[in-house]
Amino acid sequence: MSKENISIWVHKQLTGQLSAAEQEELDKALSSDASNQQLARDVQAVWEKTGTLGDDVQFDATKAFQRFKANVAAQSPRQEQVTPNVRPLSTSAGPRRIFLQYASAAAAVLVLGFFAIKWFGNNSNDIYTVESGASPVVAQLPDGSQIKLASGSIIQYNTADFAFHRNVKLQGSALFEVKKNGSPFEVSADNINVSVLGTTFVVKSEGATKEVKVLEGRVAVQTNASNRIEITGKQGVVLNNGQLTKVEDVDFSELSWSDPEMVYNNEPLSRVISDIEAKFAVKISFKGSSNIEKCPFTSGSLKNNTLEEIIKVLEAALSIKITKKSQGEYLISGGSCS
């Protein structure tokens, strides 16, 4: 189902014009795809922010489209920051009067206008950054995809239009586990670009080392239109002197940082906590100035255990209490090394 249809149906729902059959189809589309849910929220947000105007305006689709193209031309080349109140579909009727014509024959033009608002209205406040620092971290994206960042790596993406343009910028190395939802997923790392629909792959861009490795699925790697290679599971691509080269049967042993084995033999609790923070993207701190973090801990493999299961093991073994302070934050108190 197209994004345009979903936008139109959400508008008709807001104005009480949606039929029972259309409501059923809309419900199916929203329940099957998180990006459709985000689109519905965006349409409703535009509706709520445009104010209250009458329904008596006549809409000229041809003129509106010409205005839209003129605004596109005016915005090229695209700037990093754009004045927030730019109106790609400028008209004396106002945005809500235009929006009220969504169900008309000019619906496609209006959908373009809606997307233009999102494209041209972006500013630095929409850019979300995740930085791993000294330890690997896990980043959850709005579409359900997951990125495991190696230490010293950074990703950035635009929260305002991620439902429509799943673009991520990477500095360093990361393991991507992409949810397939019909929308392309793109990674930019210096001068290489990776395009996928849904797969698991690694991108490394550190100094002179530029490479991509695919664990599952298929990706396209390119530097320009004439320098492009597609690879599938267990294949890779390296960039040397500006030229991409395919590699068969790549080695994934270096990915130990992405999924700690979590087997401990008299390891200090601080090491265990560091692994937990990296694996589950949480922050765990110690209460007070006790030396509990130095207590030795021994266990079999905890690699396949949930966070809750590991917490129970630690509490029982060290007589500690691990309390959830907030989403993703935990506090360790009590305990002894005896």
Image (cartoon, grey):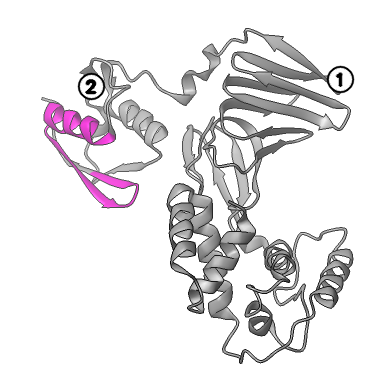
Name the image quarter holding residue 161: bottom right
Q: Say what amino acid the circle numbered 1 marks.
A: Asn
Magenta segment boundaries in residue numbering: 307-331
Q: Are marks 2 and 1 in contact (CB under 8 Å)?
A: no
Q: Earlier in the sequence, mark 2 or mark 1?
A: 1
Q: Measured from the top left, where is residue 114 in percent x and y? A: 68, 68
The residue lying toward the viewer, choosing from 284 and 257, is 257
Between disc 2 and disc 1, the foreground one is 1
Q: Is residue 138 left or right of residue 337?
A: right
- Reading the image, the residue beneath label 1 is 241
Which residue is at 75% across, 82% downward? 59
Q: Going 79% across and 75% down the picture, which residue do you hit?
A: 61
The x, y position of residue 13, in whole percent, is 49, 72
x, y percentage for residue 262?
33, 20
Quarter holding the C terminus is top left
Query: In terms of depth relative to the viewer, which is nearer, 291 or 39?
Result: 39
Give me the residue at 27% from left, 26% from top. 305
| Residue type for callout 2 | Pro
**Helix, strand or loop under label 1:** loop
* 3D distance between C-alphas at marks 2 and 1: 49 Å
Q: Which residue is mark 2?
A: 296
